[in-house]
Image (cartoon, rainbow, N blue to C red):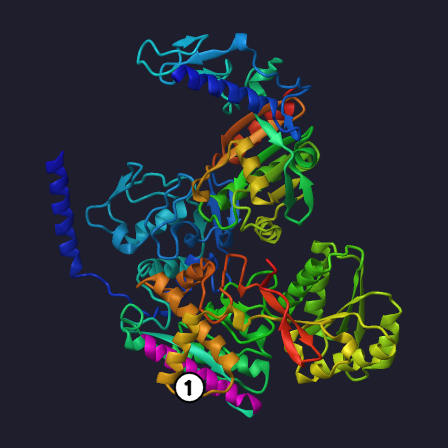
């Protein structure tokens, strides 16, 4: 028995040795035909629009190819995803064409596949020896052209790499603003990410691949920015993007990432696109306005747990506030915090005295305000005249220094949410950032943006490290989905999941001490998940 | 010492049965409450040699292993294989499937009580899926879809289909909705998810619990709650076979 095993090992070794000379190296660029084949393999659809059908069992069961694409069972790299006792065959060309044939775990044996044999397997469910394939392997009906495309791709399966992955480098893209008020932010992002990845590269890169950074600029309109980024990704072979400045073009950029299947880690925005269906490619670091509003509701119902109190929601008209209004209503329902009344106003004709009068008559003591700081201030001044000073909850991003001028009757009654806080930073995190800043002489302005870009880059690198040497976009997404309470040391720890794309879901709540004119923290991290 | 231990087990068994949660429903029809086993009917058997049995704890005469307490019906399958079980009123033969009234959510996010809303008095077929399962769940679901077509107007009137997620933490109602839409599911077919604890207890009760979701077996549970008839079948068998099994459950008196 042992002898046989040794013999077998020897034999295998010889075979491997023999094959080494014909070993196909990894390649990046698929031919147009292979690309079309890849779409059939991955999605079960033809780029020509022709129908692809799958038949199961006694052919009585017909489903569209998109319900059962090859990759479902055989995996993205063709090695197979065993489930419930079903072991899909390794589909890599190297395996299928072993000169001594293939013996399956089930005992089924057959000589090596040829292109023609593969076609028969796909259409009739027979292997090269004429054996029936496993009953869960569908038979496919597709056009000759599609079949040729698919077979062309199957020969490359497991050997193709995503764009931007080379033997010695990995290309990462960053979107930055370069004009107007935002130019400074763009410069800060560029400086900190360049420094961070220089540092990574100086330590051997990621599994000996140097990270190559490329920058693309925002344009005047969301559509133009999106077009810029699209040609950038395609022309420059961008593997993934990080800390892109998407504000204003959040929807467009997120949709583009999904379309091109390019992961984006840590876009700088207050409006994460996290609706259903989930955008798998985009990973946000912090809560946006919607999620922060939920945190405010959680905070309010913990601190003042009067179930019947209810609240007023005051917001400007428009799409941006609508998300937060929905979030507050939903979270209130979950916390059963009583009846809600909503008031909307038009920014152009904001009438603080009239609004204050109307609201004060509702005999409610809690107001969620989604407008700007100056509007909130005007409202508080009018309310103060009416001797009405409710608890006022606002997302912190909307306000500025003007809030310190609020009437004293609102002392410690204004509550602001912030997606991160110095309290979330660790000594180690601060130290490593300072060391980087000193070594690369980073600018001192836009510290929050710098910390965000730094954290995003750190999470991306962590993901790439966890993926390992054979990196792909899908693997990166799967690994990021597995991040749990990963701390960058500079902001709250991040957790992602198959249904979760906001790393730190929740907020810190602070109040304003109007006598001392300063912020005063009133909560630790308020979770919303 | 072993005797003492076994006595402890016996005691534990008594306690468990006595404390059976009240929201559980026995499956068999016209059910008598399950009686705590009577000391006199206790039976001890060797785990390796079931034919070696005694009324008292002891050792196996063939291999010396300690005899274990068994329910005297335990050698019968809890739920019969796809061949119909005895049609006569032997309640005990089917009574081991308890269907908890777990709080679950359907694909539209509606909160339901599993037993009362989905099973009580109905003929049902249950399969077990999860939306990130790509190897066996699509064929399982496609099979159900075909069964749905075959059953035609019986669907939602005489027969109901249920797909329970074995991965409730990830499978939100929205995910189930999308999954269902992919297979064009119709009325009378409910996708179920919920709190992990609730779903786990449900899966446990239905005999579909697994430690690793990728190990979940393509099994279908078919039953007629009104008559207490339950059976299981292989989920990847042909839709015709499955329709036959369901029809038998429908016709069971």
Chain bearing tag 1 is: A
Q: Which residue is mark 1?
A: A442
Identity of the residue drawn at 56% across and 11% down: B38
What is the x, y in percent for residue A319? Answer: 70, 73
In-image side of A40 versus A1 (left or right) = right
Tell me the quarter of the picture where residue A17 sits.
bottom left
Residue A183 is one of the magenta-drawn residues: yes
Quarter of the figure with the C terminus of chain A = bottom right
x, y percentage for residue A408?
77, 79
Residue A525 is at least partly visible in this image: yes
> Dot 1: within a 10 Å radius of its alpha carbon, few (fewer than 14), some, or many (20 or more) residues?
some
Outermost front residue: A516
Q: Which part of the image, by quadrant, shows the N terminus of chain A?
A: top left
Q: Measuring 55% from the left and 46% from the top, which residue is drawn there?
A: B168
Prevailing secondary structure of the magenta residues: helix
User: Where residue A68 sits in the image (x, y, percent)?
Assistant: 47, 50
Say whether residue A351 is left or right of residue A20.
right
Q: Nearer the viewer, residue A503 or A132?
A: A503
B43 falls in the magenta region: no
Name the element at disc 1.
Answer: loop
Residues in magenta, as a range: A181-200
């Amino acid at each position: 028995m042992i002898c046989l095993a040794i013999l077998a090992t020897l034999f295998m070794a010889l075979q491997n040795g023999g094959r080494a000379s014909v070993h196909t190296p990894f390649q990046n660029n698929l031919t147009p035909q292979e690309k079309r084949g890849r779409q059939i393999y991955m999605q079960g659809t033809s780029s020509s629009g022709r129908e692809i059908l799958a038949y199961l069992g006694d052919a009585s069961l017909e489903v569209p190819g998109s319900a059962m694409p090859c990759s479902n069972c055989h995996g993205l790299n063709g090695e197979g995803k065993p489930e419930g006792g079903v072991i899909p065959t390794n589909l890599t060309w190297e395996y299928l064409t072993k000169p001594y044939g293939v013996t399956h775990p089930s005992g089924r044996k057959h000589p090596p596949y040829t292109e023609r044999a593969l076609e028969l397997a796909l259409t009739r469910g027979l292997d090269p020896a004429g054996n029936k394939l496993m009953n869960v392997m569908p038979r496919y009906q597709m056009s000759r052209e599609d079949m040729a495309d698919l077979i062309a791709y199957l020969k490359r399966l497991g050997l193709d790499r995503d764009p931007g992955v080379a033997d010695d480098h990995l290309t990462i893209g960053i979107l930055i603003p370069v004009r107007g008020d935002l130019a400074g932010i763009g410069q800060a992002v560029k400086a900190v990410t360049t420094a961070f990845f220089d540092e990574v590269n100086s330590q051997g890169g990621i599994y000996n691949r140097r990270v190559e950074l490329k920058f693309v600029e925002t344009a005047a309109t969301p559509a133009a920015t999106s077009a810029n980024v699209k040609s950038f990704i395609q022309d420059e072979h961008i593997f993934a993007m990080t800390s892109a400045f998407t504000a204003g073009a959040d929807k467009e950029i997120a949709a583009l990432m999904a379309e091109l299947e390019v992961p984006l880690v840590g876009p700088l925005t207050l409006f994460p696109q996290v609706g259903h269906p989930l955008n798998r490619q985009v990973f946000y670091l912090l809560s946006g306005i919607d999620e922060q509003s939920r945190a405010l509701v959680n905070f309010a119902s913990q601190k003042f747990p009067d179930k019947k109190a209810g609240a007023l929601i005051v917001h400007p008209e428009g799409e941006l506030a609508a998300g937060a209004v929905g979030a507050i209503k939903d979270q209130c329902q979950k916390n059963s915090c009583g009846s809600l009344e909503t008031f909307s106003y038009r920014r152009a004709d904001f009438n603080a005295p009239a609004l204050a009068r109307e609201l004060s008559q509702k005999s409610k003591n809690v107001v969620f305000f989604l407008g700007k700081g100056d509007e909130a201030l005007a409202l508080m001044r009018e309310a103060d005249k009416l001797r009405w000073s409710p608890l006022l909850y606002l997302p912190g991003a909307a306000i500025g220094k003007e809030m310190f001028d609020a009437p004293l009757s609102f002392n410690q009654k204004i509550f602001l949410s912030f997606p991160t806080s110095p309290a979330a930073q660790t000594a180690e995190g601060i130290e490593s950032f300072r060391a980087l800043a000193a070594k690369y002489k980073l600018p001192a302005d836009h510290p929050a943006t710098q910390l965000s870009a730094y954290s995003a880059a750190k999470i991306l690198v962590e993901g790439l490290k966890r993926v390992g040497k054979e990196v792909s976009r899908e693997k990166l997404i799967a690994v990021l989905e597995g991040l749990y309470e990963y701390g960058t040391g500079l902001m709250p720890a991040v957790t992602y999941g198959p249904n979760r794309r906001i790393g730190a879901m929740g907020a810190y709540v602070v109040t304003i001490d109007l006598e001392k004119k300063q912020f005063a923290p009133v909560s630790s991290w308020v979770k919303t998940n | 010492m072993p005797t003492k231990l076994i006595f402890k087990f016996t005691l534990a068994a008594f306690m468990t049965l006595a404390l059976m949660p009240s929201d559980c429903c026995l499956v068999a029809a016209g059910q008598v409450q399950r009686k705590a086993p009577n000391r006199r009917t206790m039976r001890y058997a060797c785990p390796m040699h079931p034919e070696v049995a005694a009324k008292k704890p002891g050792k196996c005469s063939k291999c010396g292993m300690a005899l274990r307490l068994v329910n005297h019906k335990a050698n019968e399958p809890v739920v019969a294989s796809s061949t119909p079980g005895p049609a006569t009123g032997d309640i005990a033969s089917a009574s081991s499937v308890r269907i908890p009234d777990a709080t679950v959510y359907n694909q539209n996010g509606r909160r339901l009580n599993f037993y009362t809303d989905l099973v009580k008095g109905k003929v049902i077929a249950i399969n077990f899926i999860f939306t990130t399962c790509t190897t066996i769940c699509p064929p399982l679901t496609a099979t159900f879809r075909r069964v749905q077509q075959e059953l035609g107007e019986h669907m939602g009137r005489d027969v109901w289909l249920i797909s329970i997620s074995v991965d409730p933490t990830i499978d939100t109602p929205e995910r189930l909705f999308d999954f269902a839409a992919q297979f064009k599911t119709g009325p009378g077919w409910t996708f179920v998810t919920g709190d992990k604890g609730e779903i786990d207890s449900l899966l446990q009760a239905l005999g579909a619990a697994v430690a690793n979701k990728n190990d979940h077996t393509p099994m279908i549970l078919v039953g007629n709650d009104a008559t207490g008839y339950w059976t299981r079948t292989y989920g990847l068998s042909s839709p015709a076979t499955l329709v036959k099994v369901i029809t038998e459950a429908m016709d069971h008196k």
